[in-house]
Amino acid sequence: MAEGGVRGRGPSPPILQDIDSNISRILQDVHWSAKRDIIDCLCTEIEKDDIREAREIVFKEARARFLEIEDGGRLQGHSLPTCMVLKQRRGEKVRQTEAEDLYDLYAYSTGLMHDFPKHVLTSIVRTPQQLEPANTETNNNSHAHDEIPTPFP
């Protein structure tokens, strides 16, 4: 391996330094290989627990990128989720699904994808607008608190 990179293709993104070296080697090819090939490689060469751990690390990076871009950009902080939770995968194809999540999160984190991969999130995501009362008349109503969702920790 070339110093500071994989297969002589230049320096590795910083995110690759935080995950297993075998996963880093495979993910480094996202710009040159088909998504299916990367996912197949992850599923055949990497243990399920290692994929899960890398997925969680890359999710944190992707979330940070999302909040940085969205907060400073087009949404100006008004529609940001207050809680983004990584979906817990289960079932027969858990390794495959988590490998797909890992690929998509990594592709987003490195700028290969422009939209955050929302399919990796739980379905319960709250925004500040959802946490605020709709209007002051509703606040004066005795049932107002029934309509206000509670924030997540």
Image (cartoon, helix red, strand yellow):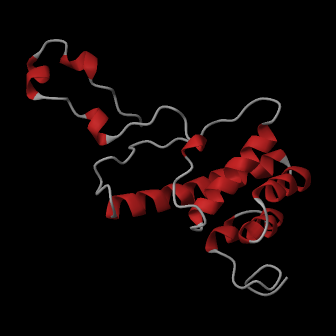
**Quadrant assignment, res 14:** bottom right
Q: Please tell me which residue lies in front, 33 or 138.
A: 33
- Which residue is painted at 26% across and 20% down in the image? 147
- Looking at the picture, how far across and down is residue 101, in whole percent? 67, 48
As displayed, is residue 91 above or below residue 72?
A: above
Q: Quadrant of residue 41?
A: bottom right
Question: Can residue 52 be seen from the camera position used here?
Answer: no
In the image, is 37 to the left or to the right of 149? right
Quadrant housing the N terminus: bottom right
Q: Residue at x 83, y 65 (%)?
A: 22
Using residue 74 as the reference point, say whether residue 115 is left or right of it.
right
27 versus 7 height, above or below = above
In the image shown, does 75 or 67 lie closer to the viewer? 75
Residue sitting at 67 percent across and 66 percent down? 18
The location of residue 40, given as percent across then percent down, is 86, 52
Q: Quadrant of the C terminus?
A: top left
Left or right: 59, with 146 as reference point: right
Residue that protrudes farthest toward the front in the picture: 34
Residue at point 27% right, 38% down?
129
Image position, residue 128 (x, y; %)? 29, 41
